[in-house]
Amino acid sequence: MSNALIVHKAHLPKSLLCIRAAQYVRMSTDRQQYSIQNQAAVIAAYAHAHNLTLVRTYKDEGESGLLIKKRTGLLQLLEDVESNQADFGHLLIYDVSRWGRFQDVDESAHYEFVCRRAGIKVAYCAEQFENDGSMLASIVKNIKRVMAAEYSRELSAKVYAGQCRFARLGYKPCGRAGYGLVRELVDERMQTRRVMKKGERKYLLTDHIRIRPGDPLEIAAVKWMFERFLEVKSETVIAWELNQKGLVSSTGAAWTRAAVGAVLRNESYIGNLIFNRKSQKLRQAAVKNPPEQWIRSEGCIEPIIDRDVFFAARNIIENRRVDLSEAEMLARLRKTLLTEGRLTPAIIDRTPGLPCSATCQTHFGNFRNLYRLLGYTPKRNYEFLDARPVWSELRAKLVDQAAAAIKAAGGRISSGGWSHCLRVNGSACLSVRAARYTPPQKPTHAPHWSIEREACLPDGWIAAIRLAEHNKTVLDYVLLPTDGKVKRTIRFSEAARARRGIRRFKTINGLVQAITRQLTGPDSTPHAASKPRSKRQKAAHSKTTNIHRQR
């Protein structure tokens, strides 16, 4: 866009506005090297023939005409026009389709109307009609808009058909190669040209893209993932271990459960190429296609994983999923309840033929709704579920405050792929949780608090928001170390907290200060806190703990 000084339209006389014009040019892909120049040449000739002076250029390079989103040139043009900042009286456009190939043909008509309403005349320099507002001009423009939209639909169908044909031949029409794989450009004789970089496209029609194994280190990581999955049967554990090793996924981000699952389900590792699992046409939302529409080309990639290993992992994944109607789910859950005498998420997860507990929550909202439908009254009090949104907000606030304080102290912050979790300086880990209040089961017993944590939480620290009775308000905050070997649920009473040396803080600021000192100081590992102390060290630690309790 021009960097010239913008003069307010209101300050220019009408006689000057009548000879000043702006141009809007657009090309849809970065491979149309001369499209902008060709449009500008035609527009310049039109301006010269009509004694107009071009004073402003709005352009969109390499942007699709299907949507107005990301078209900064057109958006700036409309903003200048609607805010009365346009210092020109004419807008010159190459043809009607330059507004866009919108599937709603009224959209481009609307943008032209916005300009004409502001007193700006719109001219189409390469069209064979005069845009003078006549009936003929209106009819032709509408036909042109329909043709522009239909061109996109026809082109999309042709491209899709071509992609399917090449996928059947074992070529990779589009998309990423996958972790441990690369896209290789080959000519018509299947001779290798080069390995293609991320985002790079082929230009010659005779060239094609194939998939082959890439980095040996990534290939070794893929093999390890399959072997490890057969042992632990948990994508979450594998993601954690990969992040601890400092490995990143194919997107450059940290490993997550979903990313590991995508690797374990990818048939490219046994030599098969699958295309058309999803399709996205004309920039609309992507849709999942049924398996019968998938295109599978077998044996077109050099295999990395043994087929027996791959299908053993697939069987583990598929056996987790049980597709049932809600009525059948309730019938099976009721049968399990009669057999077990009680029903918990753990019982549901380990019982064959039942959907997992997460699926039950998705279908029935929460376990209280499920128990009500089953006519079951559990001994456990599920009142704490009502306060979960409050906990989540408090945890997010604590993570933000801790991250800001650690950064201010010179620490480096990253995420290990978990929610409400921070990795500091690439090693120490801080996990923020809620310590839920549980009332005493007997009059002689004391209340205790429970911290639910993910499996295989790595070495580091747990900062917990300790909740008061009914789990709706905050009692205080605690900080405790973990060596990655503690149970999934950490339970402690007030007496046990003091006995185990779990530090307590009355305010969130006191907790954040302690976290910052612990994670950015010389003793930033939890093992330093768990080592045996001398009498002098114990006395100093007791004094420090008393100071923190007073905060």
Image (tube, grey):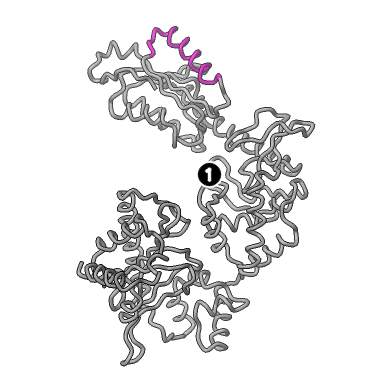
Disc 1 is placed on an element classified as loop
Region of the chain picked out in magenta, as a range: 34-54
User: Closer to the camera, 73 or 103?
Assistant: 73
Q: What's the residue type where badge 1 is placed?
A: Gln
Q: How many marks?
A: 1
Position of the N terminus by quadrant: top left
Residue furthest right in the image: 189
Give the vertical position of 222 relative to 139 (above or below). below
Please give the name of the residue rendered at 55% of the width and 27% of the height, measured from the top-left corner.
30
Give the vertical position of 377 relative to 354 (above or below). below
The quarter of the displayed image where residue 515 is located = bottom left
Question: Percent from the top left, x then y, of residue 348?
Answer: 54, 78
Look at the image and tell me whether residue 467 can be seen. Answer: yes
For the stretch drawn in magenta, the main secondary structure is helix
Look at the image and tell me whether residue 257 can be seen. Answer: no
Question: Percent from the top left, x then y, of residue 306?
Answer: 74, 57
User: Closer to the camera, 317 or 94?
Assistant: 317
User: Closer to the camera, 271 or 533?
Assistant: 533
The residue to which callout 1 is attached is 284
The quarter of the displayed image where residue 440 is located = bottom left
Magenta residue check for 224: no
Please give the name of the residue rendered at 33% of the width and 74% of the height, measured from the top-left corner.
501
Position of the C terminus by quadrant: bottom left
User: Closer to the camera, 54 or 487?
Assistant: 487
Q: Is residue 463 left or right of residue 273?
A: left
The quarter of the displayed image where residue 396 is located = bottom left
Please give the name of the residue rendered at 35% of the width and 21% of the height, measured from the top-left corner.
120
Question: Percent from the top left, x then y, of residue 366?
Answer: 44, 73
Magenta residue check for 38: yes
